Image (cartoon, helix red, strand yellow):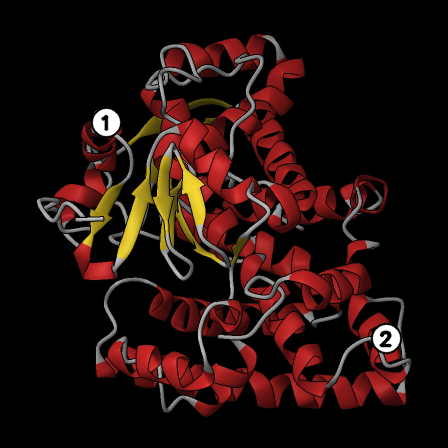
Amino acid sequence: MSPSTDLCFDPLSEAFAQDPYSFYAALRARDGLTYYQDFDVWLASRFDDVSEIVMHEHMVRSLDHVASPDEIAEQKRALNWHDMPHHSRFVQFSLLDSDGEVHDRLRKQVFKLFTPVMVNQLRHGIQAYVDGLFDKLADREEIDFVEDLAAHVPGHIIGRVLGVPDEDCPQLRIWSENIVQFFDIDRSDERKELAERNTTEFYHYLLKLRAEREAVPRDDLLSLMIESERQGHMNHDEFISTAMLILMAGHGSTIDVLGSGMHALLKFPDEMTRLRAEPSLMKTAVQEMFRFESPLPFFHRYAAQDVTICGTPYPRGTKFGVLYGSANRDPKQFPEPDRFDVGRSPNWHIAFGRGAHFCLGNHLARLDMDIIFSTLLKRFKSIELVEDTPAYKSGLSVRGPKSLQISWKAA
């Protein structure tokens, strides 16, 4: 194939951060997939194309299936993804970036605590925690919805599931954000050092927490994983990597979608009014928040064999970039995709992925959001945006406002 190289855009720019959807629309208008040379990746932007790739039996997340150790090492050097001993052990390998037997084995060890039944048992505790946050903020006329509210919920909740003390959760957010930032396009040496240093600190923290649980087991995920390792279902590195992944996944993306969900309600005030009048729509409203502003808009897959995608053959080893953020605005799948509709049904969005890598924490994230927004609309009779155009985070792999200044009045 002769890949097209005329794709010109800057995913780190402010313009893209404020409006990636114009670019996505132009991308969807092209025939087939589009080659993005800077990332050596074929971008899939339409809903059907993204779905075909993530559900394809020969697509994998890990390079281990498509390249030799020497080739992998060369690629890591080219991407400045090398010389990061702890990041390589615990972040570059994870449940998220494994396939086949390894992925299935690790997922099985933690899945039982993320089923709808188990997650729903957390409702009372989450509600009490959220009520306490609102109690502390209710007397203020203005808040930053992201920093003052959203940032304090998902990490604490997933921390409690794992067994992390509440007072440690703010530090976990710092570690998580500093580690995850290196997955985006900017791979500078400064960002690399930040990711490795924070991974090392996180690792030593988990070793300390693990020692405490070994001495005094509790009814939490960390104790469950310790027992899984004792029974031979995971090794030491897999234990640390899985604990890190669960804590990191419980932070950034949920904070981002809480912020963008609040922003959507403020941009579409009629929908907020509708949701107040019909609180039974909250579950569909939460799903619409994930569709409208997918918090993790970009993932990748590798072809483990020669494949045909969208009618075009691609060789083994081809890297595909699946743009969930674009797929969820595809007008062929979603009528009026740029309109935020709290009652949208059906709404088979792809924000949580599909297939074997379907998001493990989707039930918990949606419960967090259901409780937060339901409580917000009950306790505050008016909510308004203070700034006209909130700034959004830059990058291809994240989507969410940096801050969201709102004013409110208690009911």
**Quadrant of residue 29 in the image?**
top left
Question: In front here: 350 or 265?
Answer: 350
Rendered residue at 86%/75% (across/down): 228
As displayed, is residue 410 above or below residue 400?
A: above
In the rendered image, residue 256, in percent from the top left (x then y), is placed at: 43, 47
Question: As drawn, is 256 to the left or to the right of 390?
Answer: right
Q: The residue tagged with tag 2: helix, strand or loop?
A: helix
Question: As drawn, is 74 to the left or to the right of 50?
Answer: left
Mark nearer the N terminus (2 vs 1): 1
Q: For the residues marked 2 and 1, what is the alpha-carbon distance in whole angstroms? A: 46 Å
Rendered residue at 18%/57% (across/down): 37
| Numbered badge on residue 64 | none
Question: In front here: 246 or 257?
Answer: 246
Question: In front here: 404 or 188?
Answer: 188
Kindly identify which residue carries mark 2.
228
Question: As drawn, is 1 to the left or to the right of 341?
Answer: left
Kindly identify which residue carries mark 1.
25
